[in-house]
Amino acid sequence: MNDNIAGMDQYSTALERQKEYFRSGRTLPYDERKRNLLKLKTALKSHENEIIGALNADLGKSAFEAYTTEIGIVYEEINYLVKNLRRLMAKRREPSPITVFKATSYTISEPMGNTLILSPWNYPLQLTMVPLAGAIAGGNTAIVKPSRYSAATSALMKRIIGETFDPEYITAFEGGHETNTALLELKYDFVFFTGSPNVGRIVAEKCGSKLTPCTLELGGKSPVIIDGTVDMKLTSRRLAWGKLLNAGQTCVAPDYVLVKEGYQDRLIEELGKRFREMFGNDPMSSSEFPKIVNEKHFSRVNGLIAGSAVAIGGKSDSSTMKIEPTVLYPVKETDPVMQEEIFGPVLPIITYRTLDEAIDFIRMREKPLALYIFSKDKASIERVHSLVSFGGGCVNDTVIHLTNPRLPFGGVGNSGMGSYHGDESFRTFTHRKSVMKETILFDLPIRFAPFKDKIKLVRLLMK
Ligand code: NAD
C-alpha cells in the first residue's frame, strides 16, 4: 500500500514536471527535435553491444536478428524522421471554398503534448524506441514503461534514456502491470500502447474514462493463404522465416496456414527442409534460434502443441526454454492452438477447398493484424484483399511489409487502432489543427441577417 502511494507520487511528480517542461515550449523547435532524435541514435549506437547482449539474455536473439529486427529498424526510423522532419512539421495549405472567397486555409501539426508509451517484451527495443522517436519528432514529452518480462533490455533502456535525456523531457519507469495500472491513473495527452488485445481493452477503458486519445498496437491470429499456383520451395522459405523470427514471438508472425486441399503434404515436406536448412537437424541447439521468453509462455505454447497432431518437431527443452520449429497437421478449428494467438514456433495447417471457404474462415474470426497470401493468381489476391479486413500484410511474403516506413503499420478492430512508422508516426504523435485566415479587406454580406431572399443565391453556391 505504502509502496503504491510512493509509486503514485513518483509518477505524478514525473508527469507534473513534464507538463511544466512542455508548457515551456522547449520541445517545439525543429532544431531541438532533430537534435534529440540524433541524440537518441548516438546513445543507442554507443550502447549497441550492450543492447545485443541484453536481447540475447532476454530472448536468446542472435546478434544478426537483434540488429535486423530491432536496432537497425530504430536507426532507419530515426533517419527517416530526421530527413523528413521539416516537411512533416510544415504548415499545410489547403484550398478554401468559394463561399469564403479570399480566405486562406491551412493546418498546423501541433504536438499531442505529454505522452505515455507502454511497450511489450517481444521486440523490447524496437517497440519502445520507434514510438519514442515518433514522440520526439512530434514535439512531445514522454514517459516510457517497457515490459518486465524483457528485464535486461528494459533496465538497459531505462539507463540509456536516463543518461541521454532530462527526465522532465523523457523518462522511463521499470515494473510490471501494477506500474502500468498506476501510470494509467494519470491524465496524459496521448497514450501509445503495444501489447495484447486483452490488456489493450483495459488501456482503452482507462483512456476512455478520461477522454485521452490512444493508439493501440495489438495482436491476434494472422492467417496465411497458400493456393495451388505457388512455387512451394520459395513459399516455404518465406513462411518459415516469418514464423521462426524471434521463435514465433512476433505480433505479425504467420499464426496459421490455410492451404488448398491436396497441397498440404508438399507444404509440410518443404517446410521441414527449410527448417533444417535454416537451423540444422537440431534447431534447439542452434545459437541462432531464439528461446521462449519465460516459463509461463513456454508451458502455454507446449500446451498448444499437445492439443493437436504433430507433423514436424514438437519437442522442447525446459533447461534452455527452446521449442522446436513445429508444424501441426491435421488441425481442427476446435483445437486449442486455434483458440488463441500462438506466439511461439508452432504452425498449424488447415486445408480449404475453395478460396471463398478460406475467406469465410478468416472473416468469421476477429480482424487480424496481418494477412499473407501466396498466389500467382491476380484475381484471387484481389478477391482476398477486397473482402477481408486486416491491419496490413504481404503478397508472396511474410512480415517484411513493416520494414517500409512509407507504409502505416497498425491493426484494425481487435488487432488495434491507429498506426505508426515514418510519416504515420509523426501524424500519430501530433494533432492537425485547422485554421482559416479570413481577409479583412471586405465582408461578403450574404451570411449576415437580414436574410430576406438571400437563400436563392446560397442555393446557387451550395448545391
Ligand atoms: P501484454 O498485453 O501482456 O503486455 C503489454 C504490457 O502491458 C506490458 O508492459 C505489461 O506489463 C502490461 N500489462 C499486463 N497486464 C496488464 C494489466 N492488467 N493492466 C495494465 N497493463 C498490463 O502483451 P505482451 O505479452 O507483453 O506482448 C504480447 C502481445 O503483444 C501479443 O498479443 C502481440 O501480438 C502483441 N504485440 C503487438 C505488436 C504490434 O505492433 N501490434 C507488437 C508486439 C506485440
Image: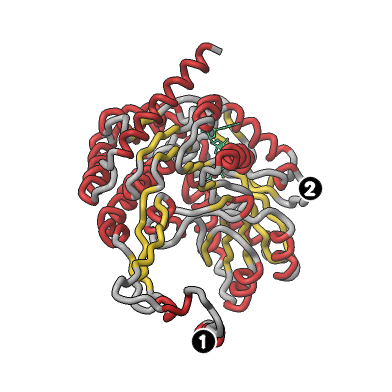
Q: Position of residue 310 (x, y in %)?
A: 69, 45
Counting residues from the start of the chain, the first of labels 2 and 1 encountered is 2
Whether label 2 touches label 1, CB < 8 Å: no
Where is mark 2, residue-wise?
Answer: 334
Q: Amino acid at mark 2?
A: Thr
Please name whichever residue, 106 or 396, is drawn nearer the observer in this view of the structure: 106
Q: Position of residue 16 (x, y in %)?
A: 39, 29
61, above or below 461, in the image:
above
Q: What residue do we see at 40% from left, 52% from top?
A: 430
Q: What residue do we see at 54% from left, 34% from top?
A: 292
- Tell me the distance, in whole angstroms, between the alpha carbons under discs 2 and 1: 65 Å
Q: Residues within 10 Å of mark 1 (few under 14, many from 20)?
A: few
Q: Nearer the viewer, mark 2 or mark 1?
A: 1
Tag on residue 457?
1
Q: What residue do we see at 27% from left, 45% from top?
A: 37
Q: Residues within 10 Å of mark 2 (few under 14, many from 20)?
A: few
Q: Seen in the image, is 67 located left or right of residue 244? A: left
Q: Is mark 2 within 8 Å of ligand 1?
A: no
Please name whichever residue, 73 or 140, is drawn nearer the observer in this view of the structure: 140
* Residue 240 in sight in this render: no
Image quarter in which the N terminus is found: top right
Q: Position of residue 234 (x, y in %)?
A: 51, 63
Q: Quadrant of residue 198?
A: top right
Ligand 1 positioned in quadrant: top right
Q: Seen in the image, is 177 located left or right of residue 16? A: right
Please name whichever residue, 447 or 71, is drawn nearer the observer in this view of the structure: 447
Q: Position of residue 408 (x, y in %)?
A: 45, 59
Q: Quadrant of residue 84?
A: bottom left
Please name whichever residue, 1 or 408, is drawn nearer the observer in this view of the structure: 1
Q: What residue do we see at 48% from left, 41% from top?
A: 191
* Residue 349 in sight in this render: yes
Q: Amino acid at mark 1?
A: Leu
